[in-house]
Amino acid sequence: MTAGDGKSSYARNSRIQEKAMVEMKPVLEKVTREVYTALLPRKMVVVDLGCSSGPNTLRFVSEVISIIARRCRLVAQHQNNVELQFFLNDLPANDFNNLFRYFEQFKKLMTRNHKGKALPPFYISGSPGSFYTRLFPSQTVHLFHSSFCLQWRSQAPKGLERAKKSLVDEGDIYITATSSPSIVKLFQKQFQNDFSIFLKLRHEELVLGGQMVLTFVGRKIEDVHSGEPNHFYGLLGQSLRSLVDKGLVEKEKLESFYIPIYSPSVHEVEDVVKQNESFNINHIQLFELNWDPYDDSESDVHDSVQSGTNVANCLRAVMESVVASHFGDTIIDMLFTEYARLVAKHLKKEKTKHAVIVLTMKKVC
Ligand SMILES: C[S@@+](CC[C@H](N)C(=O)[O-])C[C@H]1O[C@@H](n2cnc3c(N)ncnc32)[C@H](O)[C@@H]1O
């Protein structure tokens, strides 16, 4: 994600992720209450996986503190008995320093917002590392949360370069309507392996009765060739191709670039959880969010040019570092200007939405 809090930073361009958190707030509230009430831990360990660095990170922490504080007030005998330990996890390159700078201010704000009512003592630490590796000691975590992260793969699938020899796939950076079956299979296999490892690791780290709340970008329809993510990343592929046509990007560079993402359908998620056998799914749902983070309406796109820019800013904050590390940073402005233009053209024809999957699971054995 783009670091800092400048104009194109993730911190200033994460409204779509904020909207997802608002949508799944009741689910988080239910699961947090369930975990606390069932286990009544003296020290409750809560982890946000893929926390990034922005307002959403501390929003999550604030929500969990408020839920536990309300619960403590209801169950009077446990008041003030629980201490909360938050671990904020992300890849080591995440802008943890920017996040840590807000901690003191956040503590003061929490006390002020609760108007003198007692809050459980809470402690917040950073935890750098990939969530596709072990991060915590065995059976120490009560609640895992992750929002808008699990569509990211541990790497772009291996073997794509060989599979891409077919002419129709040339220049694609994600699965498209014309992707060959071998390309699709490689992406799907990468998702199945990554998600299965993720479940195994989190199962080892959770206490018995601990739960996970996972929200990530998925696919509404089963057809892997024509879901919403295909359009979303397909337009980025087209923007890169237009830079190749203008001689600004080498063709070979584009041909060796794939985004390390796969957005699964609900069925694909359920299949991996079933095969894994270590979790029961308590709740799974899919909801939709307009591509344009600032469009909260159900009506047609009002201003497609503005919407194109909003969508491009949002994707840039997420993808800039991935794109720049492969192509260099000189193309970034041109690339996302072209992307904004293509998105505007697309939205003029058809209002499109992200499909977001929410999944809650409990460790039962
Ligand atoms: C779109 S951001 C979401 C951030 C935040 N949860 C929110 O809702 O605003 C996705 C985050 O996932 C992180 N991420 C991706 N792959 C990861 C991995 N393997 N391990 C840990 N974090 C990862 C990225 O670095 C990024 O900060």
Image (spheres, helix red, strand yellow):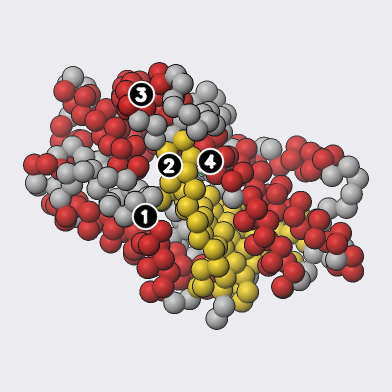
Tell me the element at label 1. loop
The span from disc 3 to disc 4 (Cα, nearest Å) is: 24 Å
Q: Earlier in the sequence, mark 2 or mark 1?
A: 1
Q: Is residue 110 above or below residue 85?
A: above
Q: Position of residue 347 (x, y in %)?
A: 37, 27
- Please name the amino acid that badge 4 sits on: Gln
Q: Earlier in the sequence, mark 3 or mark 4?
A: 4
Residue 253 image-quadrant placement = top left
Q: Earlier in the sequence, mark 1 or mark 3?
A: 1
Question: Which residue in the protein does label 1 denote?
Answer: 264
- Please name the amino acid that badge 2 sits on: His
- Please name the amino acid that badge 1 sits on: Pro
Q: Position of residue 47 (x, y in %)?
A: 61, 58
Q: Is residue 219 visible?
A: yes
Q: Nearer the viewer, residue 132 or 348?
A: 348
Q: Is residue 297 above or below residue 125?
A: above
Q: Are marks 2 and 1 in contact (CB under 8 Å)?
A: no
Mark 1 surroundings within 10 Å by alpha-carbon count, few (fewer than 14), some (14 through 19), many (20 or more):
many
Mark 3 surroundings within 10 Å by alpha-carbon count, few (fewer than 14), some (14 through 19), many (20 or more):
some
